[in-house]
Image (cartoon, grey):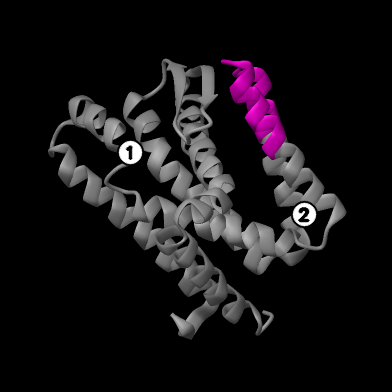
């Protein structure tokens, strides 16, 4: 593995932290693509949860303010609800892992992500605004993948920032999902499920780092 990857990773973490917590409106603007990506992966995780458990997806909406929703029918509601937070954590880790470990596949990963965004905007159309956002993001990813040499760094940063965003936002982002999960599954109150989901997301990220960088973690 390229010895420069770990310093690049640490630099990305530093950039993300500065922009997220000290960047103000400028930081929010720079990280806006990350916000939209997290929303897409969250909603796409709901959609995958429905499809993998025999259900269907009726619509997927991404809003400019970073909110969104997915309309599903059938399938396991517990898996669908869990798929938003934990599914996006899994997908974010996968993007990060490909960016770090498979340099030659970074371009293909960006193109695949662009294809999935465009496809979701068509198959699960909810509004021209949502589809336009997805198409715009897909076009940007396509440009980075095919016309620049930033594909590996872009994939690493998007994957890393997505995971950090998800972990940091654990008590806000999935709150409505958690409330519904408590009603569907029960056993624990939603606050307990919140920390269980956080532990799974954090554990997955630590395992990923450990597998990628070994003794450094």
Mark 2: give few (<14), some (14-19) or many (20+) Cα within 10 Å.
Answer: many
User: Majority secondary structure of the magenta segment?
Assistant: helix
Mark 1: give few (<14), some (14-19) or many (20+) Cα within 10 Å.
Answer: some
- Specify start and end residues of the magenta stretch as a single range: 117-137
Residue that mark 2 sits on: 107
In this view, 161 is above or below 132: below
Mark found first going from the N terminus, 2 or 1: 2
Task: Classify residue 132 by image quadrant.
Answer: top right
- Residue at the location (13% across, 38% down)? 189
Q: Is residue 51 left or right of residue 133?
A: left
| Secondary structure state at the residue bearing disc 2 | helix
Q: Which mark is residue 143?
A: none
Name the foreground residue: 8 vs 119.
8
View extreme (front): residue: 25
Q: Nearer the viewer, mark 2 or mark 1?
A: 1
- Residue at the location (51% across, 44% down)? 35
Rendered-image quadrant of the N terminus: bottom right
Q: Are marks 2 and 1 in contact (CB under 8 Å)?
A: no
| Secondary structure state at the residue bearing disc 1 | loop
Q: Which mark is residue 174?
A: 1
Q: Is residue 3 left or right of residue 191?
A: right
Name the foreground residue: 34 vs 167.
34
Rendered-image quadrant of the C terminus: bottom left
- Residue at the location (68% across, 20% down)? 122
């Amino acid at each position: 593995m390229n010895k420069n990857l770990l310093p690049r990773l640490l630099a990305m973490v530093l950039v993300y932290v500065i922009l997220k917590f000290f960047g103000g409106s400028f930081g929010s603007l720079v990280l806006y693509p990350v916000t939209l990506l997290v929303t897409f992966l969250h909603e796409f995780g709901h959609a995958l949860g429905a499809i993998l458990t025999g259900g269907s997806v009726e619509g997927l909406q991404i809003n400019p303010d970073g909110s969104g929703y997915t309309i599903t029918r059938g399938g396991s509601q517990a898996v669908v609800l869990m798929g938003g937070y934990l599914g996006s954590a899994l997908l974010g880790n996968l993007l990060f892992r490909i960016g770090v470990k498979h340099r030659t596949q970074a371009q293909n990963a960006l193109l695949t992500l662009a294809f999935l965004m465009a496809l979701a905007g068509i198959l699960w159309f909810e509004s021209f605004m949502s589809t336009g956002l997805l198409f715009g993001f897909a076009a940007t990813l396509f440009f980075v993948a095919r016309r620049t040499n930033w594909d590996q760094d872009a994939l690493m940063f998007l994957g890393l920032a997505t995971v950090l965003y998800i972990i940091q936002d654990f008590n806000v982002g999935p709150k409505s999902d958690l409330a519904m999960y408590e009603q569907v599954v029960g056993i624990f109150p939603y606050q307990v499920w919140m920390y269980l989901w956080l532990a799974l997301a954090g554990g997955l990220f630590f395992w990923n780092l450990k597998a990628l960088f070994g003794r450094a973690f």
